[in-house]
Image (cartoon, rainbow, N blue to C red):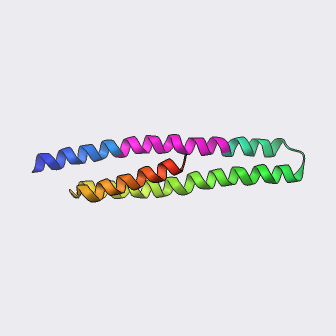
Amino acid sequence: MKLINIKLTGLCAGIVLTFCSLGAYAAEEHVEEALKHAKAAAKADDAKEIAQHAEAARSHAKTADEHLDAGITSLDNAIAHGKQGQADMAKKAAEEAVTHLKAAE
């Protein structure tokens, strides 16, 4: 039984690390878009154009942040449940993390 818990913990840790790196990549896309729009706003001369780019930048930054926060919370839950030997709950939390991390893309 103890060997199964060790294997399950190792598996959960591997899944969490994988999702964390995917989450970083997903957030990077939104951050890149936010940066692109922020740069465009900084270069623009027209007030309306500046506001439009700034709004787009803010939207991308907020989206990435909200989904990453939710994804991290789900990953924390997956870790906690995995350490407690609750495979079904750990898996559900990991699946929720995938959903949030994909949404951050």
Q: Is residue 51 left or right of residue 80?
A: right
Q: Position of residue 20 (x, y in %)?
A: 43, 45
Position of 80 compared to 64: left or right?
left
Q: Is residue 35 magenta?
A: no
Residue at (79%, 52%) from the top-left corner? 52
Q: Quadrant of the C terminus?
A: top right
- Of 102 and 64, nearer the camera is 102
Q: Quadrant of residue 80?
A: bottom left
Q: Main secondary structure of the magenta part?
A: helix
**Occupied quadrant, residue 11:** top left
Q: Is residue 22 above or below residue 86?
A: above
How many marks are shown on the rendered structure?
Answer: 0
The location of residue 37, given as percent across then percent down, is: 73, 44
Classify residue 74 as left or right of residue 82: right
Q: Residue at left 69%, top 54%?
A: 58
Magenta highlight range: 16-33
Q: Residue furthest right?
A: 46
Residue at 18% from the left image edge and 46% from the top image edge? 6
Instruction: Tell me if residue 81 comes above or below residue 31 in the rendering.
Output: below
- Rendered residue at 59%/41% (across/down): 29
Where is residue 71 drawn, in percent x and y?
45, 54
Residue 30 location (% of width, % of height): 61, 45
Q: Does residue 27 belong to the magenta stretch? A: yes
